[in-house]
Every structure is written in C-alpha cells, then in structure tokens.
Amino acid sequence: MGAAALLAPVCLGGLAACGKSGGGSPSAPTNVDFTVDVSTGALATNGGFLVMNSIIIARTNNGAFLAVSAACTHEGTNVNYVAGSNKFVCPNHGAQFSSTGAVILGPATRNLTSYNTSLNGTSLRVYS
Ligand code: FES
C-alpha cells in the first residue's frame, strides 16, 4: 500500500477550483495595524510583493509601498502584483485593480480595500 495514495489531492494550478473562499464575496480585513520588515524577503526588492494578514503588500518599481486587501472581490482568490503595469491582477478569472485597489477590469465589480503604509527605517507599518 503506497503512502502517497493517502495524501489529499493538492491544487496544481487549475484555474477554477484553487483558492476560492467557498462562495460569496470576501470581506476585507478591518482594524489593521501591523509592521513588516522590508530589509529582507520579497519587499527588499522593487517589484516584490507578499501577502500577510490577508493583505497584499507590494513594492513598486519606484520603491513606494502599496497595501490592499489580497482577496479578489469576485471570488476571493489572492491577487498578484504586476510591477510593470503597477496593478493587481487576479490569476483566477483575470480581474485587474489599480495600485489603490480600484477595479480596472472585471469580472470583479468591487474595489479592493486600500490601507495606509508608513516606513520607519526598514519597518513598514500597514494600518487602516
Ligand atoms: S476570483 Fe474571479 S476574477 Fe478574481
């Protein structure tokens, strides 16, 4: 009996089923206030991004920081940041959002929630 047969199926990049929130529109985080070290990892480089506490934090090609709710307002898949066009793109059905989270292209109809950022040394504060 192979142990591998007991493993749960994994998401291998299919377009439809991966990353959904289970139906309904996701709600954006509220009362946000945390810090992240931008001296290492994805945020140490212009164009990098990461998701923390359900918020996608991105470093633009100009070195500015952006923070918006990560869950696409269509069906909840986490969006990606595309530095070349300075926007957020959902890998699931292709919705696009501006750097401040405004809908550019559907099927999403509601904006991502934008959060404040404040850099103190290498510590970036993300807050409501
Ligand atoms: S989940 Fe459908 S476009 Fe994002």
Image: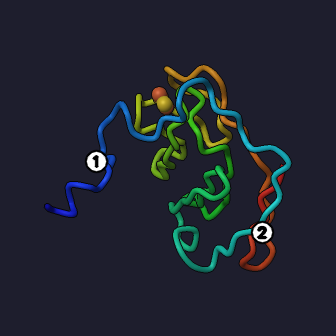
Q: Quadrant of residue 26?
A: top right
Question: Helix, strand or loop at disc 2?
Answer: strand
| Label tally | 2
Q: Is mark 1 within 8 Å of ligand 1?
A: no
Q: In this orientation, which residue lies closer to the viewer: 7 or 37?
A: 7
Q: Residues within 10 Å of mark 2 (few under 14, many from 20)?
A: some
Q: Taking 89 as reference, is 82 above or below it?
A: below
Placement of the N terminus among the 4 image quadrants: bottom left
Residue 18 is left or right of residue 33, and the answer is left
Q: Given the image, on which type of amino acid does mark 1 rest?
A: Leu
Q: Which residue is mark 1?
A: 12
Front label number (2 vs 1)? 1
Q: Quadrant of residue 16?
A: top left
x, y (%) of residue 93? 41, 28
Q: Residue 32 placed where, x, y %?
A: 81, 52
Name the residue rendered at 51%, 24% in the picture: 105
Q: How did the renderer colour the structure?
A: rainbow
- What whole-number distance in Å separates the C-alpha atoms at marks 2 and 1? 36 Å
Residue 117 left/right relative to 57: right
* Image point (28%, 48%), residue name: 12
**Tag 2: amino acid:** Leu
Residue in view at x 57 percent, y 74 percent: 44
Q: Residue furthest front?
A: 1
Q: Residue at x 32, y 51 (%)?
A: 8
**Closest to the observer, 127 or 29:** 29
Report the residue marked by disc 2: 119
Give the quadrant of residue 53.
bottom right
Q: Quick one: label 2 or label 1, which is nearer the N terminus?
A: 1
Q: Secondary structure at mark 1?
A: loop
Please state the horizontal and vertical placement of residue 123, each as a whole percent of the image: 75, 74
